[in-house]
Amino acid sequence: MSEPRAETPSFLDEVFDQLHVSDDVRTRLAQPRLALTVNIPVRMDDGTLQVFKGYRVQYDDTRGPTKGGIRFHPRVTLEEVTALGFWMTIKCAVAGLPFGGAKGGVAVDPKPLSRLELERLSRGYLRAIADIIGPERDIPAPDVYTNATIMGWMADEYYQIRRQQTPGVITGKPVHLGGSLGRTSATGRGALYVLQQWAQRRRLEPGDTRIAVQGFGNAGFHFARLAHEAGFRIVALADSGGAIYAEDGLDPALIMRHKLNRRELKAMLYCDASVCEEAEHEEISNAQLLELDVEVLALAALEDQITADNAGRVRAAQVLEIANGPVDAAGDRLLAQRGIPVLPDVLVNAGGVVVSHFEWVQNRGGEYWDEARVNDRLKNVMEREAGRVFELADEQNCTLRSAAYRHGVARIAGAMHDQGTREYFQDAIKGTNVE
Ligand code: NAD
């Protein structure tokens, strides 16, 4: 089998050239340091045995233990997990966290599983990867279709294997099991802080800023709720069941309450009721939502939503990437040509991993912070790093994505250069003084 490689973005070469990084950095970032494939046997409720494929990829750990979520989704593949691990490496560096990047996943549709089956699968996956994770080594967290409950089961399984309580092994845990206050809403909140920084620079008034949000899960819901509270106008929302539109604005918290009420039994783990079941608004298709005339298109579902096929029809004035990779490379080029700025995922959705870092710090220190402290610190980090990325884009006349990568890669390259590169060792061989 060929080595899994992240399909590195086409502009990455330009980023490397611009930063004058050593070829060693390119070589090391071209492939993951570790990619594990596991088969997880799970006893189903009807007595049959099913085997699920799972993956854990630790992409790069030069800047610290690797960090990245676990996704339960039928389309999970080693290639996807590898690409997501690469993005995590960049994201942790963009946010200035002392972490490298990783990702994990299981190819499964979790929705039809019973809670007991889901618990057995979660514990089985953790057992399969237990040897390569740890608070000082690789620290998982939730991602698509995994949540705090699942992280709690996985942490418990790890403690049973190690025979010790090491809550820093996994973040995004329930608060009563060592999770951090503010973690659940951190990705959406962080995205809002980035948008607010951007709005200030562009003199966008929240009340005049219409936002369409694709994805109404953890990231999309909290972003929409908090943006609404901050005075922005959420005019459209979509989940996998469909989309709704209201020119005067929607109240995301109210819509979530209705959505949960419809499926009380399943609401704790997954909410299957679609936002489309709401009245008092126009029902539109998911494709239409992407092409609405709005100030901000916030993408908080899955990857590859804006591609060469539909980028030409996007009418939003700017795109906010809350999901990982929602705009593909061709879509990105087309949006850039059309002068539509894309606020990139590696910056916009970093709030989740920033508060995961806070959780890891609290777990290791054994002292817990109140929510105001978490949110304050999150705000500081997001504003500082977003400001730096926006300045870089202005100074170097490049896209925001390119600026974010320059910012992150400069930190990773700095760490790799400090370990010694080919140039350093060749100089030493030639007899140059070693400093
Ligand atoms: P989630 O499972 O909680 O929610 C996903 C949402 O997307 C659901 O509302 C689902 O109905 C919707 N969806 C799925 N397919 C859709 C489609 N075709 N059209 C419209 N909606 C669709 O997942 P999440 O945790 O919110 O993650 C969403 C994205 O954000 C992912 O790309 C994830 O990697 C990224 N992300 C999440 C976090 C986090 O802390 N949760 C952190 C960083 C990045």
Image: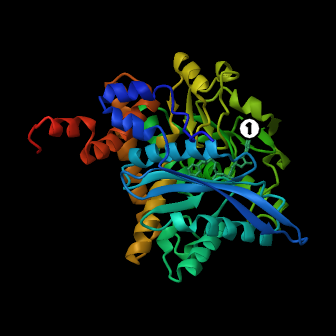
**Image point 27% across, 40% down: which residue?**
421
121 vs 287, nearest the viewer: 121
Task: Give percent across and percent down for residue 114.
Answer: 82, 67
Residue beneath disc 1: 246
Question: Residue farthest to the bottom?
Answer: 163
**Image point 74% across, 52% down: which residue?**
255
Mark 1 residue CB less than 8 A from any atom of ligand 1: no
Q: Quadrant of the N terminus?
A: top right
Figure check: 256 above or below 401: below
Q: How many marks?
A: 1
**Image point 49% across, 46% down: which residue?**
32
Q: Quadrant of the C terminus?
A: top left
Task: Give percent across and percent down for residue 165.
Answer: 50, 80
Query: Is 362 on the left-hand or right-hand side of 296?
Result: left
Task: Give percent across and percent down for residue 107.
Answer: 73, 52
Question: Residue farthest to the right?
Answer: 46
396 vs 52, nearest the viewer: 52
Which of the 4 image quarters holds residue 173? bottom right
Question: Residue farthest to the left?
Answer: 433
Residue 277 visible at all = yes
Callout 1 crowding tier (Cα within 10 Å): few <14, some 14–19, many ≥20: some
**Visual colour scheme:** rainbow
Q: Secondary structure under badge 1? A: loop
Q: Amino acid at mark 1?
A: Ala
259 vs 77, nearest the viewer: 77
Which of the 4 image quarters holds residue 409? top left
**Image point 51% across, 64% down: which residue?**
133
Residue 231 visible at all = no
Task: Give percent across and percent down for residue 59.
Answer: 49, 48
